[in-house]
Amino acid sequence: MKRRAFLKAAAATSVCPFLQGRSSAVESDGPAYPGLLDNLRDKIHRWTDSLWDPDRNGFRQNDQIGVNLMSTIDVAWMRYAVNDPNLHGRHGKAWIRYLQQAQDAKTGKVSYGPGPGGQGHPDGHAMWHTVRALNILGGRP
């Protein structure tokens, strides 16, 4: 289905309430809202950048929980999902180093650790998310 036909169908149904009543906005082959996704991507980048903790070289989940592996991984995934052209921001090497140090040297496990930062996810989840984040960022697992 071509983009225009898809958008017309979405605008005509309740499947996509965002486009309802905007059939004129989907008549062209261009975006209905020029710059909308670019603007969203920039806001996501600025927001995630504000979560960086230079003392711990990771990203905070929030002010109460602080830096943890899951939030640091999630930022890589979020920036990747919105195709952020400045994926690493100013923190590339330190960010990769933080993720590489998540693996326990004795056991080989990667764990989110106790407390609210990992939300009870298993070590396997922590391992594969960390490896994927490292691959996204261009680091070696």
Image (cartoon, rainbow, N blue to C red):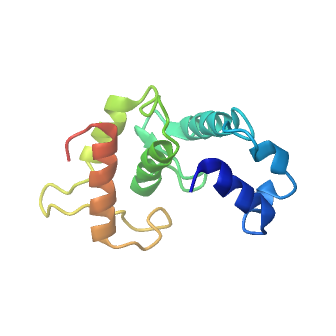
Residue plotted at (41% across, 30% down): 91
70 sits left or right of 17 in the view: left
- In percent of width and height, residue 76 lies at 43, 45
Q: Residue at 65% x, 56% y: name it.
A: 6
* Residue in front for this viewpoint, 35 or 92: 35
Query: From what the image shows, is residue 68 above or below residue 91?
Result: below
Instruction: Count every numbered label the image shows and give the total.
Output: 0
Tell me what residue is drawn at x 49 percent, y 42 percent.
79
Query: For this rendering, which residue is in front, 77 or 47?
Result: 77
Q: Is residue 1 left or right of residue 80?
A: right
Quadrant location of the N terminus in the rendered image? bottom right
Looking at this rendering, what residue extends furthest in the top direction? 90
Question: Can you give x and y, in whole percent of width and height, for residue 54 in the image?
Answer: 46, 32
Q: Position of residue 63 (x, y in %)?
A: 61, 49
Farthest residue, direction right: 21
Find residue 96 and report its image quarter: top left
Question: Quarter of the image holding residue 108?
Answer: bottom left
- Horizontal side of 73 relative to 62 (left or right) equals left
Name the residue located 34 percent from the left edge and 48 percent from the top edge. Answer: 133
* Residue 61 position within the rendered picture, expressed as x and y whole percent measured from the top left: 54, 52
